[in-house]
Image (cartoon, rainbow, N blue to C red):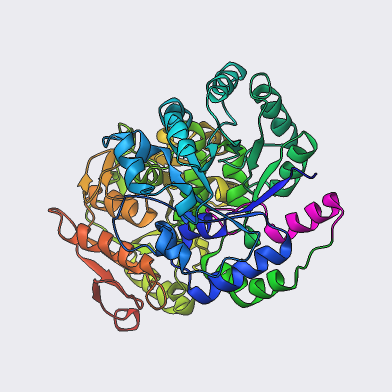
Amino acid sequence: MSKLTVLDCTLRDGGYYNSWDFSREVINEYLEAMSAAGVDIVELGLRSLKNSGFKGASAYTTDDFINSLPIPDGLTVGVMINASELVGDTPQLEVLEALFPVSADESPVDLVRIASHVYEFEGALQAVSWLTDKGYRVGFNLMQIADRTEEEVIKLAQLAKEYPLDALYFADSMGSMMPDDVSKIIGWLRTHWDGDLGIHTHDNLNLALSNTLRAISEGVTWVDATVTGMGRGPGNARTEELAIEVAELRGKPTNLVPLMTIIRKYFKPMQTQYGWGSNPYYFLAGKYGIHPSYIQSMMADARYDEEDLLAVIEYLRNEGGKKFNTATLNNAREFYSTEPKGSWSPSDVFSGRDVLLLGTGPGVKHHQEALESYIKSHNPVVIAMNTQTHIDAELINYRIACHPVRLLADVEEHVTLSQPLITPYSMLPESVREHLADKEVKDYGITVESDTFAFGDSYCTSPSSLVMAYAFAAITSGKANKLLLAGFDGYEGKDPRNEEMNSVVLNYRNTEGSLPLLAITPSRYDVEKVSVYGIV
C-alpha cells in the first residue's frame, strides 16, 4: 500500500459539464480538500492547442494559471493531453514544444498523462521519451480497452514496455467492465508490462469503486477518482468513497471534513444542475458498450423522451456506438431510414372525409363532452394517436402509432383495443410484429427524410418519426377533405419540444398537397384555431 497513488481528476473530467470553467473559489477549496483527504496527485485539467468556443482555464491549464493557485505542499500537479493532438496533422515535436515550452524543473507540472485510443497508441508513445527527457513523469491512459482481444492487449503491453512510462493506465471507457474483467485485463497487460499499472473506472453499472478496489487487490498502484464522481455521463469512482477505502488500506487517518464541505457547497449543487451519475440509461449503455456521451447528450435535450432514449440505445446496441458521433445520434433517433414498405392505402377510408385526429394533450379530456357531441353530429373519421382513451371508444375509428419502443410498451393495450391500428407494420422490429400478430393492422409504410413530406399511396416520407408527422402524412395520402386537431396543446413554457413539433406543423403546411389544419381545442402550434363549442 505504500506505493498506492490516488489521483483526483475532477477539474479535468468534470470539465466536460461546465466547459472547464471552475471558479477560483472552488479550485482553492478543492486543493485544500484533496490535500486533507490523502490524495497524492491532482490533475488540474487538460492541456491543448485546440481553441474552439469558450472554455475555462482548466481546458488549457497553463503554467501561469497553475502558478496562480495555492498548491498545498506535498500535492503533485498533473495535466492531461489527448493523443489525437500528438498524431494529427501538426508534427508531434511542434505540438509538444508548444504545449510544454519549458522543462519540468521550471514548470509546476510534474505529471503528464496522455489519453489514447488503441489506434493512436503506437504513434503517441513516441512523445514519452521527449517528455521524460524534459524531466516530466509520464502516464498513459489506454481508452476503450474492454472489448479488445487478449492478443491485442498483450501487443499493447509489448509496445509500452519499450518506453520509460511511469504508469500505464487502462480506462473502462464504456463503464461495461465487471470486476473479473478488470482482473483479466490486468493479467494480459502483466504478460509484458512490469511497471506501475493504473485504472480509471466509470460508474455505468455502479461498479466504479468495486472495480477500482479489485484492481488494487490485483496489484494496480495508481487509481483515479473525482469528487462526487463528477465526469462525463455516469461519472467515475467517487473520491470521497475511495479516500475512505485507501485510508483503511494504508492504515492512516484522513481528514474528510474539507472534502465533505466542498461537496455540500459546490459539487452537489452542480450535480443537481448537470445531472451526472448512473441511472438506468447509463446502465444500459455500460451493458451494451455504448459511449456515455450519447446518453449525456440525449438527457440534456428535452426532445428526447423515455421512448427515444430507449430506442436509440437499442439502435446503438445493434449498429455500434462505441465512438460518439453527433450524426450517428441524429440518425439513431429516426428509426425509419430504410426503403419504405406498406400494403394499405388510406384513401380507401379517408377520401373526401373530414378527419379528426386526437392527440395526447389534456385538451381531449378537458373538452371530452364537446368533442363527443361534435363526432356524433358531424361523423368525421376519428383517429386516436397511440392509446388515447379520453373519448368513448365506440366513437374512435382507428388508432395510429409508429414509434417502435412506444408500440412495444403499449402492445398489450393495443391488442385489447377494438380499433384497427395504422402502423408501418412490415417495417417494425420482429419483436413488435409478433405481439401484433392477432391485431387488425393497416400497414402504411414510412421513411424519414429531413424537412420532407411526401404522400404515397401505401407509404409516406416524413421529416420525423413522431407519430404526429406520420398521422399527417397518412391522412393526407388518404385524400381527406379536412384535418381537424384536438389534444395538440403543446408544452408548458419554453420546452424545446414545442419548437420541434411546430417545425413539423410548418413543414407540413408548406408542402404541396397538404390539407388545411384546424385545431378545435387549445393549441400552441401555428395552425388555424376555432372552438369545438362553436361547431358542435
In-image side of 468 versus 292 (left or right): left
Find residue 523 and report its horizontal and vertical position in percent: 33, 75
Up-down relation of residue 255 to residue 426 (above or below): below
Q: Is residue 433 above or below residue 32?
A: above
Magenta stretch bounds: 230-252
**Image check: 85 left or right of 280?**
left
Q: Check residue 492 for magenta coloring.
A: no
Looking at the image, residue 4 sits to the left or right of residue 314; the answer is right
Q: Position of residue 41 (x, y in %)?
A: 62, 54
> In this view of the protein, which residue sits in the foreground, 272 or 184?
184
| Residue with the most extreme left position | 512
Residue 327 visible to the viewer: no
Taking depth in this image into account, of 162 and 105 the one nearest to the observer is: 105
* Rendering coords of residue 343 (x, y %): 34, 33
Q: Quadrant of residue 532?
A: bottom left
Q: Quadrant of the N terminus?
A: top right
Residue 247 among those drawn in magenta: yes
Q: Residue furthest bottom?
A: 534
Q: Residue furthest front?
A: 105
Question: Which of the two residues, 491 or 314, is positioned nearer the viewer here?
Answer: 314
State the residue at coordinates (30%, 31%).
339
Q: Quadrant of residue 27?
A: bottom right
